[in-house]
Amino acid sequence: MSILITGGAGYIGSHTSVELLNAGYDIVIVDNFSNSKPEVLNRIKELTGKGFKFYEVDVLDKDALSQVFSENHIEAVIHFAGLKSVGESVAMPINYYYNNITGNLILAEVMAKHNVKKIVFSSSATVYGMNNISPLTEDLPLSTTNPYGSTKLMGEQIFQDIYVSDNEWSIALLRYFNPIGAHESGRIGEDPKGIPNNIMPYITQVAVGKREKLNVFGDDYDTHDGTGVRDYIHVVDLAKGHLKAVEKIMGTKGVKIYNLGTGIGYSVLDLVKNFEEATGVKVPYVITKRRPGDIAACFSDPTKALKELNWKTEKTLKDMCKDSWKWQSNNPKGY
Ligand code: NAD
Ligand code: UFG
């Protein structure tokens, strides 16, 4: 019996693969390397000392995906595969809807055909939209402001509707807050293409000398120091949340929705300060204007995941900074 991990060569997928292998699961990874590199697979093997099957397959390729299910005894799926850049989604909405939505539909169709009805879906805090006040609980009204966010909200809806049509499904919708950090070995981490959109890879590229300074997007928000506040979560804590979610869907039916976050909001300047303290490396920055679409504060109420999954984060913001830096400084060019 194996867990199929779509997008397992990516940032969160690779860390989750390591945690699953270390916990004794057999895994099968499917990825088309649209946003990752084959080298990550060697690193996963190196870190765990375990082998696994890998298929270079696009989730949109129904026949190839179906073949993966025919050749393996898949018990459940963790579905990470998707495009994830907000800005790119505004410029290329067709690609985003096509890849993310069609990917969900084809995967669900193939799963149903092979009678595999357990899935963990990567959703995002972005589904809480602009109007809710943090801390955010799972029952708040949802909305989105960009095509990427819409694919996540529609993805949630698709899986909820599938359950309504067939109560044999067991589905976990996980809303991630802001994953940062890397495996403490420094062997796997986030490897963005081009100029990073997200703050932590930008900070580490400044620290390693690849970029001159960090642009802090606005210091006039209604937050403790005026800069944007987010719920940064260590990617290894996040990966462990997937283990708990897999355990949960193995034993139950229905749709479960969980926030995966720390419950603590830190500002951009808090992050810079913690990074400098944790690593001893200076991060020069300038304040620039707000980035369109950003909100002042976004952090989770993670109580439901604690109660129902017995999961909570263990790592501190300094751990996240230290591990991001170890990854970046040991792999200045990524994989
Ligand atoms: P990532 O880009 O590092 O990983 C996604 C992986 O999926 C990549 O390896 C990519 O090559 C693969 N992929 C994309 N489309 C595919 C397709 N059609 N077929 C096969 N493989 C495909 O991203 P990540 O940060 O690891 O995110 C994983 C998931 O979590 C995504 O669905 C993302 O939207 C979601 N998420 C990420 C964040 C974040 O900040 N990183 C926050 C919330 C939600
Ligand atoms: N920021 C800067 N400078 C930068 C990059 C970001 O000041 O160069 C600030 C932003 O304004 C924000 C904070 O740092 O206040 C975090 O920004 P990120 O881009 O790292 O993350 P976001 O919260 O904007 O969005 C991320 C993912 C989304 C996801 C969301 C919630 O990119 O896909 O978290 O999970 F939906």
Image (tube, grey):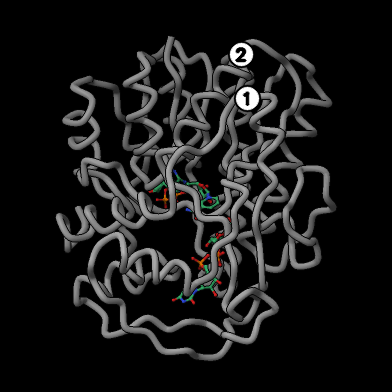
Near-viewer residue (160 or 310)? 310
The image quadrant that residue 315 belongs to is top left
Indicate the position of residue 318 as horizontal and vertical percent values.
37, 54
Q: Secondary structure at mark 2?
A: loop
Q: Which mark is residue 309?
A: 1
Residue plotted at (37% across, 17% down): 23
Q: Which mark is residue 170?
A: none
Q: Is mark 1 within 8 Å of ligand 1?
A: no
In contact (CB < 8 Å): disc 1 and disc 2? no
* Front of the two marks 1 and 2: 1
Q: Is residue 31 above or below residue 116?
A: below
Indicate the position of residue 212 as horizontal and vertical percent values.
26, 85
Q: Secondary structure at mark 1?
A: helix
The image quadrant that residue 286 belongs to is bottom left
Other residues around mark 1 within 10 Å, as few (<14) / some (14–19) / many (≥20): some
Quadrant holding the N terminus: top left
> In the image, 53: left or right of 75?
left
Q: How many marks?
A: 2
Check disc 2 and give the amino acid type: Asn
Q: Is mark 2 within 8 Å of ligand 1?
A: no
Residue behind mark 2: 115
Residue plotted at (23% across, 25% down): 48
Near-viewer residue (18 or 120)? 18
Residue plotted at (79% across, 17% down): 167
Check disc 1 and give the amino acid type: Leu
Residue plotted at (52% across, 82% down): 217
Indicate the position of residue 324 as horizontal and vertical percent values.
31, 55
Using the numbered discs, state the Cα–Cα distance from disc 1 to disc 2 in whole angstroms.
Answer: 25 Å
Near-viewer residue (197 or 67)? 197
> In the image, 75: left or right of 280?
right
Other residues around mark 2 within 10 Å, as few (<14) / some (14–19) / many (≥20): some
Indicate the position of residue 162 as horizontal and vertical percent values.
75, 29
